[in-house]
Amino acid sequence: MQSTAEQIEQDLLRPLFHSSWKYWVAVALAASLLLAGVAAFGYQLYQGIGVWGLNSPVFWAFDITNFVFWIGISHAGTLISAILRLTNATWRRPVTRCAEAITVFSVLIGAIIPLCHLGRPWLAFWMIPYPSERHIWPNFRSPLAWDFFAISTYLTGSTTFLFLPTIPDFAAVRDAATGFRKKVYRILALGWQGTPRQWMRLETAMHIMAVVIVPVAVSVHTIVSWDFAMTLVPMWHSSIFGPYFVAGAIFSGIAALILAMALLRKFLHLEEYLRPIHFENLGKLLLTMSLLWFYFTFAERLTAWYGNSPPEMAVFWESIRKQFAPLFWTMVVCNFIIPVPLLAIKRLRTITGTAIASATVVVGMWLERFLIVVPALEHKFLPYSWGTYRPTWVEDTLMASSFGMMALLYLLFSKFVPMISIWEMKVGLQTHRGVPVVAPADGHVALEGPQ
Amino acid sequence: MAHKWGLVVDLDRCTGCEACVVACHAENNIPTAGEDQAARGRAKHWIRVERYWEGDFPNPKIRFQPVLCQQCDEAPCEPVCPTYASYHTPEGLNSQVYNRCIGTRFCANACPYNVRFFNYYNPQWDMPLHLQLNPDVSVRTVGIMEKCTFCVQRIKAAEIQAEAEKRDLKDGEFTTACAQSCASKALVFGDLNDPNSEVARLSDSNRGTKLLGELGTKPNVTYLERGTWEDAKHG
């Protein structure tokens, strides 16, 4: 167990000042993936979306699957961080920053994908309501217009939510750095001195953001689900979609967080900070969400099956028994059969166990989104116009590059910002078992926890 | 009184000859997708003749069903467009304003009839088809949606002509390209608000049904059911 505030500061600032060659190899790999995606997008822009595998009637496929997937992943930060902050769960301290960073970066990716999927991406700004010579506003009846506002709100909110608790740490980096670096962090720290008044204001702002971001997160994924549910398409037009999507998003978000934490722990040598207890607790949350996911999937499928309406059953059997059956049952295995025993049996709920469960959940939740988007579009009402879909290398590259972009942003973030909140760890030291062990280095009492 | 344009498809008369499809391509500057693209599911026909088979060999029955944009009064494609590119005109047409379209393709997904088409590439015509483009119809570029317009260019031309001559439009004065080319007169186009028009009379037929009418989209295209010899005998 870490002992002193100096030790914490030293451990958590180390990755900012010293990186091994392995780090730069990882950055290069992630950046080349991203560049491959940029090249593929350029090719698509030059040729037209015909270079994708889309056709009539499958007008959305990998693009929207990845969009929903990344927006889903973003719910890690909001759930873990905001709810754990609000409930004052003290074990959250080393976890919040990694979670909030995942949120910001995955919302960013989720916001870029729909822009790239447009037939004419250069006109995307027509979604913005602004007075123009066209004398026309966006159509506020369209779920896509709702999406635009929901996601831009969420991106702004989650960036603020990430930035606020980072201010004291920027100040810590400022104090430790020299030269140009010091100047940059001086700006980022916004003149943080650590006065009681500043602490009070920061705590208040963080509290307000934590309260605000939870309903925003819930509404964002509900609105994403309404892109589907507001149409008449069989198996899309369902009132369960809002909560189903929110639950799925939180599910995949926790999985992504556990995976990221396991990687950070290994590569940044944070064994002292990200301890088995964190994986244990997050594992329990993931278990809850896995059960909830199964419940929602079961309820959705049972309602469709019992209703037995022919257009819905065409999609239903296509996904369960026919063309998509291998993917559907892989999804069930990945989201339920594998994670539940790994997370329910205490002996298996180790760091490795939760990481394996999380990896399968991420795969399973991607499949879930794909199985929502594609089979329904392939089998709409008139059998004559049914179709099939197969992605092309362009879509594969774009998808791989979204993961590359996530990895790159996360790697760079870990180079510029301490991945574990230094000041919150110090507060944790101070309030450990209610007994102050060591005063924080800045000498100020934090306004949180038993004192 | 305002016009309300409608079309009747008499399934009993349709022979499945696809003259309507060809006429539509010629009238509306629709490029042919080509073998390769068609195989990838990108054939583009604003009107298509769907074929369904009933019964097994050796006595299968073939059914033809021309499907075009149903010009719904409650069109699912319209509210989902974020830029008002799919728009309901005062005369009840589901118009597609090409200049406003940014290519979300949401309308195509929302349409239960799959009669909206996306331009995956810039259009190309095989020689000599490039010499027969209709000057009254815009050519659509890559990245936007397009669909049946009920030959809005013909509607507008006739309306303007009638207005210039200070008279009302007469039924049958003009028609859409598909109806014009239909040898068996299975397609009849006209003004549903004119009680004496042929299309209004046929729409009221007790053989009339709406395609996927149960969805509540209120189409302005009416299908007249196909009868059998037995039906005819028993009235």
Image (cartoon, coloured by chain):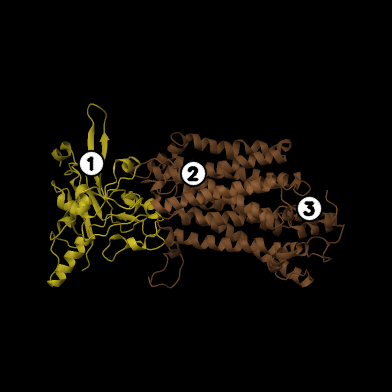
Chain colours: A brown, B yellow
* Label 3: which secondary element: helix
Residue A199 falls left or right of residue A42:
right
Q: Nearer the viewer, residue A373 or A189?
A: A189
Q: Which residue lies under the disc numbered 2?
A: A396
Q: Residue drawn 39% across and 56% down?
A: B103
Q: Residue drawn 70% across and 62% down?
A: A166
Q: Residues within 10 Å of mark 3 (few under 14, many from 20)?
A: some
Chain bearing tag 1 is B
Type of the residue with mark 1: Phe
Q: Nearer the viewer, mark 3 or mark 1?
A: 3
* Label 2: which secondary element: helix
Q: Which residue lies under the disc numbered 3?
A: A11
Q: Residue drawn 45% across and 48% down?
A: A236
Q: Which residue lies under the disc numbered 1?
A: B64
Q: Nearer the viewer, residue A401 or A348?
A: A401
Type of the residue with mark 3: Asp
